[in-house]
Amino acid sequence: MKNKDKDIEKYNNEILNRLSIFLNDIPKSIKKNDVEDIEIQFNLSKKEAFSILLGACLGLDIADNKFDREIYNLYFSNMIHFEDIKKYHDDLYYKNIRFNDISNGKWTLKFETIDAYEPFVCDDMVEMDDGRVIPQIGFFDCEYRFPAVLENDREWMTLLPNETNSQKEAIDEAFGNVVTYGMGLGYFAYMVSQKENVKQVTVVERDESVVDLFKKHILPQFDNKDKIKIIVCDAFEYAEKIAPQQKFDFMFADIWHDVDDGIDLYKRFKNLEYLNANTKYMYWLEKTMKCYLKNI
């Protein structure tokens, strides 16, 4: 491996590790007043002011440490995104699906909030031509309220930008007879059911409590609920034994919480694609998982 490649690998690991610690431990550290003070004092844009504060929160000394400064210069311009909140308020699911806080067993449907200038992952990672793996981090300049489904008080699926942005390509590509693995909030099923070229959407979910919540509180609000077919079954059991006889045109899998628990499940699904040679396959966070698989 060339020295340059070794440097890039070192940079990738460093930025991913620092971001992971920050987002898990202290994501609310950046305050609106601090961003606005830096904006005014140094005549910077919101993105520039936010980037400086995020760099400091990650422990980067861009003034005196060459390695830290290189990370900042190589990653932050392509990593940070000032998100337009209206774009997400205009999302069809966000506008049309409503529910109060509801629980069923270990599962809860509720609305949660992120603060102004609270960083969040906003899309799949981007791999650059030189090997840099760029996480995509967004922020709003005001509070954002979003629906979420929680398992034992842990967020399982949310309607944050990472969910909507990272599913957009699969939603655009879906057609014909569609199968999707994983219920969540029913976002993918709702969005593809709106498409004229989608005839039916089969949702495979193994947890009956999730299905009950969905059927009672979300599905009745679907414009095209007649297109939705729900199967209570283990995803891999269905994929191996039933899906090959159904002649699905398109398959989308989203049964993982994040990349950490998703890679092995993703690889297992990939090994089953031969059973449905005429089906088009797509997976949630696939681009990010490919980056991890390539670099581990």
Image (cartoon, rainbow, N blue to C red):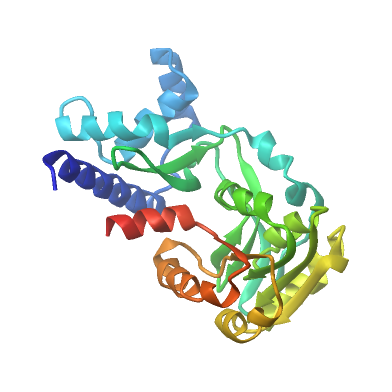
Task: Decide if residue 104 is in sight here.
Answer: no
Quadrant in which residue 245 is drawn: bottom right
Q: Is residue 12 above or below residue 201?
A: above
Residue nearest the viewer, comparing 12 with 82? 12
Q: Is residue 77 above or below residue 132?
A: above
Picture coordinates of residue 123, whole percent (x, y) = 51, 46
At x 48%, y 28%, the residue is 33
Q: Is residue 253 above or below residue 40?
A: below
Left or right, residue 238 beside residue 77 = right
Left or right, residue 119 beside residue 219 = left
Q: How many marks?
A: 0
At x 70%, y 74%, the residue is 247
At x 45%, y 41%, the residue is 137
Task: Decide if residue 213 is in sight here.
Answer: yes
Picture coordinates of residue 206, whole percent (x, y) = 63, 81
Picture quarter with the C terminus: bottom left
Left or right, residue 41 beside residue 98 = left
Picture coordinates of residue 266, whole percent (x, y) = 46, 68
Residue found at the far front of this picture: 278
Residue found at the far left of this picture: 3
Picture coordinates of residue 93, whole percent (x, y) = 75, 52
Left or right, residue 175 beside residue 257 = right
Residue nearest the viewer, comparing 35 with 10? 10
Residue nearest the viewer, comparing 264 with 220? 264
